Amino acid sequence: MTKLLLRLVLVLSVFSCQNTTLPKLKILENEFIYTEASFPQCHASTLVEAGDGNIVAAWFGGEYERHPEVSIYQSTKTDNGWSAPKKVADGKTENDAISNPTWNPVLFKNKVNDLLLYYKEGSSPSTWWGMCKMSADDGETWSLPKRFPDSILGPIKNKPIQLASGMIVSPSSVESEDGAIWKSHIELSNDGGYTWERVAIPSADTVKVIQPTLIQLPDGNLKALLRSDQNYVLESISKDEGKTWSEVKNGRMLNPNSGIDAVTLADGTFLLVYNPTEAGSDWSDGRNKLNLAYSTDGENWKDVLKLEDEAEGEFSYPAIIQDSKGFVHISYTHNRTKIKYLKVDLRN
């Protein structure tokens, strides 16, 4: 009887997973944020909804990644389309004697409606430091930059999340100069995102993990999904609002050592943007395909949209948010020359 009951439970579980109602997607907009710019290359976009419902995007652009003149650019989408890219941060000193490249902007709006721009400055990911600017007018103007203490980097690629308690949980990571060590951690803030404390996400030294993205599970626990060198997205769980984390383990989604991003939707389900391939011999291998996946539990994922599916090319470093009206917004690097943008309607 016990074996029969167990078999019945397994059959019902499989049946339930196979018959999960998937959202019906309608692509409302599919375009480039800009077609002409003063810089030839771009990467690492980020999105946020402004207080008026407009969408603000940012990314870094310049001659090439690591070039000392690489700066942070911003564009805002209104009913009239995207504004022309404007520079909002760079790595120049006051007298312009030195210029450092800037990297990986992350836009975040806290619960008191401060719009924060986090970014990195420095010659490489092993030596960069965290910077922050604040805007009180949805990105029309920005404060002077503030440098974080050396132990704090800010969100390294993906957006923080703010919990009902007010705690802001920010995903971050570090890389060694020789690339042998990639370690992820979480930075926590109780003052709206201005000061932080750092906690580790445990991982074996044989595993490389960086650039976490965060979702909140139906039971209230947090899950970090992490870029890795293991050909899969790795996972870690926190049961105490990000104060401690489980050791990372393999998830179920392929990952060619490329950036990912996820979002917890208003109905408690999840979307993940990722490259659905394995790593190759070159760093860009596997970035020629980019998918959108859906999950009801944050564990089992089903692809619902192919964003890109080419024989070659780089479509990478996605960002995804849901706005206050329920629309989903996605951006990503398109062959290092433009930022692609989609607006999606989810209708169950």
Image (cartoon, rainbow, N blue to C red):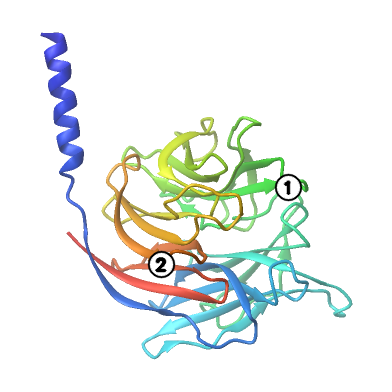
Secondary structure beneath dot 1 equals: loop
Badge 2 is on which residue? 330
Disc on res. 151: 1
Q: Is residue 177 left or right of residue 316?
A: right
Q: Residue furthest front?
A: 311
Report the residue at 15% width, 35% height from top: 15
Q: Is residue 315 left or right of residue 321?
A: right
Give the distance between the C-alpha atoms of the residues marked 2 and 1, in whole angstroms.
31 Å
Q: Amino acid at mark 1?
A: Ser
Please tell me which residue lies in front, 191 or 309: 309
Please tell me which residue lies in front, 200 or 195: 200
Quadrant of the drawing holding the N terminus = top left
Where's residue 211, x and y in %? 57, 50
Q: Amino acid at mark 2?
A: Ile
| Residue 73 is at least partly visible in this image | yes
Q: Residues within 10 Å of mark 2 (few under 14, many from 20)?
A: many
